[in-house]
Image: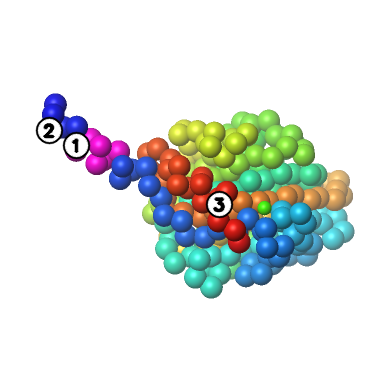
Amino acid sequence: MVQILPLLLAVLCSVCFADELFLDNFNDGDDLGWTRLGAAGFQVIDHEYYIHALGDRGMGKSLNGDNSGVMSTSDYSVLCSILIEYGTEAGILARYQGEDDWYYRIVLRPQISKILLQRKKDSGVLFGLDEYPFTLEFGISYWIRLQVQGESIKGRIWQGSVEDEPDLWHMEATDPFQLNAGSFGLFAGGYGKEKVSWSSVFDDVLVTTPLSGRLSPLTWGSIKTVGY
Ligand SMILES: [Ca+2]
């Protein structure tokens, strides 16, 4: 038992660490470095990032990465806060390379009280990987995390403080169709038969190496103390 304890401590310490790769809390008042796509409005207001309709329907996404807008590694974990003011969907994505390539995304769908884990091509195809029933309210802020690690794609959502992140993954899939790093991104949109305006608000975008095991207090501290 005496010999096991140091080994156990070493293992615990190794699994509760994640390296920060990218951080933007929009407190500098702009979205410089982000690549805007879609017919949408993109504005930083009061240190938060708004992606909203210019007319109705449509969709906007904003992409970034730790190496000139592209991720330096294909294994990473994207965290941000998200609030849907109105509209039909919003979320985060990973491994985006262009409209003809697969990427992964988490979609919040308030009207059907679900969050969805999907593989998608903007040129048209969509493949559902997993889903999780979750009642979403307009005007309420949530935390979402999308993690891509090899063929493992995982996601979760929670309300409250960032420190309240559950250990449980709400959605999981094994999928081999897009293993390139690509870019991560934020998106919002308004689809459906009815023409609706839409707007979502993002903040505290933090990309780290994949989490394994318990979460690092260092991760949460960096959101609060590092000013970008
Ligand atoms: Ca902020």
Q: Which sits earlier in the primary sequence, circle 3 or circle 1?
A: 1
Residue that appears at 71% across and 53% down: 48
The correct choice, above or below, for 104 with respect to 113 in the image is: below
Which residue in the structure is indicated by mark 2? 3
Boundaries of the magenta span: 7-12
Residue 165 appears left or right of 83: left
Residue 193 appears left or right of 37: right
Residue 160 appears left or right of 88: left
Q: Which sits earlier in the primary sequence, circle 3 or circle 2?
A: 2
Three-letter amino acid code of the residue under disc 2: Gln
Residue 169's spot in the image, x, y percent? 48, 36
Three-letter amino acid code of the residue under disc 3: Thr
Which residue in the structure is indicated by mark 1? 6
The correct choice, above or below, for 32 with respect to 88 in the image is: below
SS under mark 3: helix
Which residue in the structure is indicated by mark 3? 225
Q: Quadrant of residue 186?
A: bottom right
Q: Quadrant of the N terminus?
A: top left
Q: Quadrant of the C terminus?
A: bottom right
